[in-house]
Image (tube, grey):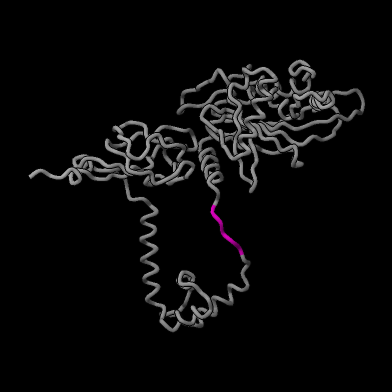
Amino acid sequence: MPVAASEQMAVVSVRIPQIGEGLQEARLVAVLKQPGDKIRRDEPIYQMETDKAVMDVESPTEGVLIEWLAQPDDILPIGAEVARVEVGADVAAEPENPAEPAPEAAAEEATAATVGSRNALIPPKTKAYAKDLGITDDELNHIPFAGSKMLPSDVDAYRNASATQPTYSDRPLSSKQRLLASRLVRGNQIVVPGTMSVACRWEALEARRAEYKASRVDFQPSLFTMFAYLVAQALETHPNFRSTLVGDATLRTFDAASLGIAVALPEDELVLAVVESANKLDWPTFAARTRERIEQARTGVDQVNEKVTISLTNMQGFGLRDATPVVVPPMVATLFIGEVYIALDPLADGLKAARFANLALTFDHRVLNGVGAAEFLNSIKAAAEDVDSWIPAP
């Protein structure tokens, strides 16, 4: 007797794969298939972002996509179920993701066993007493007691001790902060950082900005945009700063630099605006593109991708003169711009004050060495102090 079609089908789970050692979670960037679509084995069906790159993830089986169990921008632990696929029974019989059980499942089982054993040691009288005091069952299961059973006196001791403790509230990290934290942890594991700084005279940039402001033309670039353009020009002549390390032995250098700009959001969140082909754009186009990318980032769109090799973090508006920036792979450098301050000009004859801003550069020593980093930093300094050669007057 023939078997019904529905009896010949089964459902398998698609899970977040383990890509690299130490990777704990990933962000779902986009889905490439919709429920009801037929998919082939090894066909890309979604994109995920780790701390190193955005990548396509291939289907482990052939079948029909039933549903997605997560949404784009969700951050999922490695091994988490992300989708379900209907497959033939013979395919389902094959081992599916022969990995160890998810650690969170084992932890939940252990917690349930512990709660069950403690519950047997709490007499009904104590439970009723705690309930009258407004103590929840979950809180009751965390109250310590010294004897063989929990007594109302143990509940009183717990309440008295809690009354002297500082109050606090818990809230989960936002998805953006969790993703940033993942990138920072990974960077701390693999980057060998080096940091150097230089004091840069800021008066020429300020004078050029004042000229644009006084001209009242529609094109009104910010002082930071002017500085970012000078960094982009330095990237043209310092190719190692538009490079990234692939594996442990391959240096990939991009012809067109993708310049990252850190953008702060409410609730102390941070995203990255990215200006593609920054070293290939003329001054007006660069300024317009930078404004467009920053405005997009302020809506919460994180533009980071594997081609970004350096980022700028501007803290001039926060009264910070010095800092040690952090490098997040696959980037190889981060440049900090500090507040403007007045100091004696070491190159002037006699005592003369000038306006300066400190530039601090942290670089990945696996890719760059001290001399190359110093030459790059001094190129930016020289351009900022001779802005007339780079940015035309309005």
Magenta part, dominant SS: loop
Q: Residue at x 54, y 54 (%)?
A: 172
Question: Picture coordinates of residue 114 (x, y %)?
Answer: 38, 67
Q: Quadrant of the N terminus?
A: top left
Q: Is residue 234 magenta?
A: no
Q: Classify residue 380 by image quadrant.
A: top right
Q: Which residues are magenta?
A: 168-172
Question: Picture coordinates of residue 202 (x, y %)?
Answer: 80, 28
Q: Residue at x 47, y 23 (%)?
A: 250
Residue lying furthest left = 1
Task: Tell me if 54 is positioned left or right of 269 in this view.
Answer: left
Task: Tell me if 360 is positioned left or right of 122 in this view.
Answer: right
**Vertical side of 284 occupied by 22: above or below:** below
Q: Is residue 79 visible?
A: no
**Vertical side of 86 occupied by 391: above or below:** above
Q: Residue at x 48, y 33 (%)?
A: 53
Considering depth in this image, is 300 or 381 the residue closer to the camera?
300
Count of numbered circles in the view: 0
Q: Classify residue 299 by image quadrant.
A: top right
Q: Classify residue 345 by image quadrant.
A: top right
Q: Residue at x 45, y 72 (%)?
A: 137
Question: Picture coordinates of residue 216 (x, y %)?
Answer: 82, 25
